[in-house]
Structures are given as C-alpha cells and as structure tokens.
Amino acid sequence: MRLTLCIPGLLLPQQALLDTARDLPLPALATLLGRGRAARLACADHYEWLAGACGWTALPGAALRLLAENGEPAGDAWLCLDPVHLKVHRRGMALDDPAQLQLTDQDDAELRAAVAPLFAAFGELSGGVPGHWYLRLRHGELIDTEPLPQAIGRDIDPRQPAGPHSVQWRAALAEAQPVLHAHPVNQRREAAGRPPINSLWPWGGGVLPLTIPPSPWTTLAASDAVIAGLARRLDASLAPVPQSLATVADADLVVIDALADAARRLDAIAWSEALTRLEAEWFVPIAAALRAGRLNSLRLAGFGGDRGFDLSVGRSDLWKFWRRPRGLAEVAA
C-alpha cells in the first residue's frame, strides 16, 4: 500500500511555527521528517499541488466544483463568484468563512438575481448549492485571483483580482457592494444578528481539460467539493475523510483539513491540539505500518504560511538511524 497525505494548514508562518511547534511531543512526525526525503515546493497551496500531480498548470476549481454538484461545465470557461462576508480586520478588511453564512435557497436566489446584471458583460451567472455561484464567461477571459479557501481570514487587499481585466472586475465588485447592502435579504439578516453578504469573491477560473489525464490515485478521500469534482474527472473513487490510518480502507490520497481553520486564524492552541491528534491518529500508526511492512511508502505534502513541502518516506528509510529527527520549522525553512 502506498499512501499520500495532503495537509493544508500543516505549516504556520515561520516564527509562529518555531514558537508553537518547538515543545510539542511529535516524535513520530519528527522521525518521518528526518528519515524521509523532503523538498520545498514552488507552489504555496494544495490546489496548485494537486494540479501539478495531474499534469495541469492550474486547477479549474469552478468547473470541478460545478461537476461535483452535477453541473455540466463542458468546454466553457467558468469562474466561481461566491457570496461572502467581509469583516473589519486589524489591517483593513478580511474574508470571513463563507461556511458560517448558511444561506437558504430563497435568499441565495434573491441575492444572485440582484447582482447578476452587474456581471452580464463578463458572463452568465448561475447557482449551485446555496453560496456557490458560477459565472460562465462569455469570452473566456480569466483573471488572477486567490482560491477562496486560501483567502479566508486574510487581508483582502493584496488578493483582489489582478491581470488585464482587473480594473473592470474591481469596478463591478465595488458596484455590487451597495446593491447587496441595501437588499432586503441582508436587512433581515442584520436584524436577526447574522452577518450580511456584503461582497463577492471571484476564484477558481478555468476550462475543464477535455483530455482525462492518467490518475495518480485510485481513491481520493476529501471533504472539499473541488476535490470531489477532481475525483469525478479522474474517474477515481471518492471517499469520506477517515478519522485515522486504521480506517483508511482503499484510499491512496487523503486530504486532511483538520489544521486548516486554526492555521488561517493563527490560533496556536487549536492548531497544536489538532496536530497532536494527527500525531496519535496518523503519524504514529504510519511509522509503525512502515516498519511492519503494512505500508510501502508515504508521501506527505504540507502547506501553510504561503509555502509548502513534499516528503517521501519508504519502508527502508525508517531504519536509517543516522538520519536525525527534524521538526516542521526546520523542514519548511
């Protein structure tokens, strides 16, 4: 059995990582990091890494998520244009977690209808599940944006649309904000003490490649709708994320997002607790399975703090006692 773990949020910014992980009891992870072969990644997020593993230059997140929701992306260029809540941040405005908005079908449809004319020059706006909006681009003109999962909790200013059409896009997004602010749906939400939908986030632009690449994996275990769409496109199976190595079953790629939220919020306590659980539920059993021959190899891709690393560990590597244990901060430096 060969296992690949992809863990967004495994890394914090370097100084925070040094301060937080230094005294954590993580002997199994340290052994894996020290005995294996680690390399810094040029990509800083797991979507980009997944795209590279499939032989694509970028992951067409909108088309893949639409595919997961039983849509038909065909050969068109798609863009996610998701409703979001921007909150006051110590350095300006930050993107709140859209999962907390809990839009109803009716509210979602009303808000989407109100802003659709503002983006008609770019394309046709449609909806998937509540909170998932899709723009079928008329001319296939993409913009440079940051994936929404990576932007949550962060200052939005450096993550605004860039590229040849960024001026028009920023103008349309600015025009949408007062429309959303005055909408009865938001007035009802604010009266009920719920966060308003006060902006939109474009991301995941691209065209679904018509040629299906050979899949690096047979079964993907993930809770992310984009990765669910990727599994469908690769003709691979999709499984729920297991709680531990003991319940992996047939999955050969597991995307674990247990650290992602705490890492985005720079919540050192929650991050430390989640990493300690991963040590007990994953890294200790993985090291034991490698030694016993129940697992042939591990590939670990970790991300966070705008950087990433790729680790490969084979069964024989664990017997190389001269390779000293290493911490996350050392591997990610």
Image: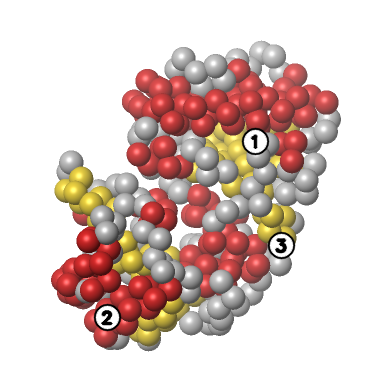
Q: Name the residue under label 1.
A: 312
* Closer mark to the observer between disc 1 and disc 2: 2
Alpha carbon distance from label 1 to label 2: 50 Å
> What quarter of the picture does the C terminus occupy?
top left
Residue type of the residue flagged with mark 3: Ala
Residue 24: image location, x then y, percent = 50, 18
Q: Residue at x 27, y 80 (%)?
A: 114
Q: Position of residue 44 (x, y in %)?
A: 43, 46
Residue 137 position (above or below residue 13)? below
Element type at mark 2 = helix
Where in the figure is residue 253, as x and y percent of width and height?
A: 67, 48
Q: Nearer the viewer, residue 315 or 133?
A: 133
Nearer the observer, 323 or 290:
290
**Quadrant of the image containing the N terminus:** top right
Above or below, comparing residue 95 to residue 27 in the picture: below
Query: Which residue is denoted by mark 2 in the rendering?
Result: 114
Q: Does label 1 or label 3 sit earlier along the sequence?
A: 3
Classify residue 239 by image quadrant: bottom right
- Identify the residue at horizontal 39%, vertical 28% (top origin): 268
Tell whether 86 sits left or right of 303: left
Q: Classify mark 3: residues with Cα within 10 Å, few (<14), some (14-19) or many (20+).
A: some
Q: Please tell me whether mark 1 or mark 3 is closer to you in this view.
A: 3
Location of residue 231 in the rendering, given as x and y in whole percent from the top left corner: 65, 62
Q: What residue type is labelled 1?
A: Ser
Please report contact status of discs 1 and 3: CB closer than 8 Å, yes or no: no
Q: Which residue is drawn at 37% across and 32% down?
A: 267
Residue 236 is labelled as 3
C-alpha span from label 1 to label 3: 23 Å
Q: Can residue 216 be seen in this view?
A: no
